[in-house]
């Protein structure tokens, strides 16, 4: 399996596991959803719905692949998707914490871009 195919597979696997874990714990009127667009290399785990008082909508995780690297655009998981990917063998140089500005990224152990 080539590198990008492996990345697609790892991202989908990790997001699916989070989705399955939290789906049963979500409030009755809130749906946990996954959206995978491999053609454009976009991967989302998000929720939509209503509480008795307000509209719920939010992105828990947004990942995209760009320039052969994994860009984590949004990550509200406790442990962090980057750590999950590291355990799966993705090198730090191929992970960009894109939710940080480029200046701050220099101080992380991950790729700047």
Image (cartoon, rainbow, N blue to C red):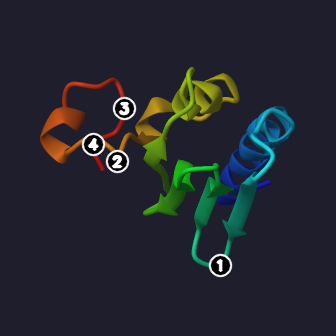
Q: Nearer the viewer, mark 3 or mark 2?
A: 2
Whole-Å distance between the Cαs marked 3 and 4?
A: 7 Å
Q: Residues within 10 Å of mark 1 (few under 14, many from 20)?
A: few
Give the residue pinned by disc 4. Answer: 112
Looking at the image, do the residues carrying marks 2 and 1 touch, with CB atoms under 8 Å apart? no
The residue at 80%/32% (across/down) is 25
Left or right of 42 in this view: 103: left
The residue at 52%/60% (across/down) is 65
Looking at the image, do the residues carrying marks 3 and 4 touch, with CB atoms under 8 Å apart? yes
Q: Secondary structure at mark 2?
A: loop
Give the residue pinned by disc 2. Answer: 98
Where is residue 16 drawn, in percent x and y?
Answer: 80, 46
Whole-Å distance between the Cαs marked 2 and 4?
A: 8 Å
Quick one: label 1 or label 4, which is nearer the N terminus? 1
Whole-Å distance between the Cαs marked 3 and 2?
A: 10 Å
Whole-Å distance between the Cαs marked 3 and 1?
A: 25 Å
Q: Secondary structure at mark 4?
A: loop
Between residue 8 and residue 31, name the one nearer to us: 31
């Amino acid at each position: 399996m080539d590198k990008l195919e492996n990345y697609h597979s790892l991202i989908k696997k990790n997001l699916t596991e989070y989705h399955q874990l939290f789906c049963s714990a979500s409030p009755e009127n809130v749906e946990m959803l996954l959206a995978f667009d491999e053609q454009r290399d976009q991967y989302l785990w998000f929720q939509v719905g209503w509480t008795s008082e307000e509209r719920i909508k939010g992105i828990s995780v947004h990942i995209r692949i760009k320039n052969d690297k994994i860009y984590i655009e949004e990550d509200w998981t406790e442990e962090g998707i980057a750590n999950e990917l590291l355990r799966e063998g993705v090198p730090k140089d191929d992970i960009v914490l894109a939710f940080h500005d480029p200046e701050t990224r220099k101080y992380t152990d991950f790729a700047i871009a």
